[in-house]
Image (cartoon, rainbow, N blue to C red):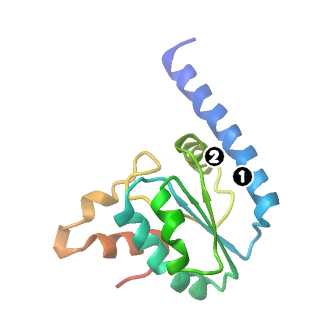
């Protein structure tokens, strides 16, 4: 098997695991078309705080009723309640976050998934926009993630 075939098979395998994880979370947390899911695949509070800070505004804009946070960052678990008292926050490991990302890259399974990262999934280049034309991290992140323009 050549390298390309192996890499493709690895990505498909990860995506299949991500699909199974997604189905399990949908069942366990009653995720439906009225649920915002914010995936925070970074161990970086400055990104995650921005995602939390603007989550309610996005839900109002999109008329979403529930919020589920999937995060690899313990700080989010400790502090999310300050931003949204009615959200469910679930600590996941990096592999679970990556598997969900891999599934999402293969198949856009919900319009209500926000990936709170400027660099993930692989190929995102949002971090390079920070500082261009005096754009702040918060301005770039909210535009990319929530379509909110500050």
Toward the right, the furthest residue is 27
Cβ atoms under marks 1 and 2 closer than 8 Å: yes
Quarter where residue 62 is shown: bottom right
Instruction: Tell me which label, 1 or 2, sits earlier in the chain.
Output: 1
- Residue sitting at x 24%, y 65%: 130
- Residue at disc 1, secondary structure: helix
Whole-angstrom CA distance, mark 1 to mark 2, is 9 Å
| Relative height, residue 62 to residue 70 (above, below) | below
| Relative height, residue 2 to residue 79 (above, below) | above
Q: Which of 93 and 142 is in front in this view?
A: 93
Q: Looking at the figure, which quarter contains the N terminus? A: top right
Residue 138 relative to residue 66: left or right: left
Residue 52 relative to residue 88: left or right: left
- Reading the image, the residue beneath label 1 is 22
Q: Residue 131: x percent and y percent?
A: 19, 68
- Reading the image, the residue beneath label 2 is 103
């Amino acid at each position: 098997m050549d390298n390309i075939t192996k890499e493709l098979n690895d990505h498909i395998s990860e995506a299949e695991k991500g699909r199974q994880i997604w189905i399990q979370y949908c069942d366990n947390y009653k995720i439906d078309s009225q649920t915002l899911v914010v995936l925070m695949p970074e161990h970086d509070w400055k990104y995650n705080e921005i995602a939390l800070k603007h989550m309610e505004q996005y839900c109002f804009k999109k008329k979403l009723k529930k919020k589920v946070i999937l995060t690899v960052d313990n700080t989010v678990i400790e502090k999310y309640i300050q931003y949204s008292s009615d959200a469910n926050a679930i600590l996941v490991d990096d592999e679970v976050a990556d598997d969900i990302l891999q599934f999402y890259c293969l198949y856009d399974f919900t319009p209500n998934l926000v990936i709170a990262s400027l660099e993930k999934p692989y190929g995102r280049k949002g971090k390079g926009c920070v500082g261009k034309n005096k754009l702040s991290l918060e301005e770039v992140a909210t535009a990319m993630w929530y379509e909110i323009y500050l």
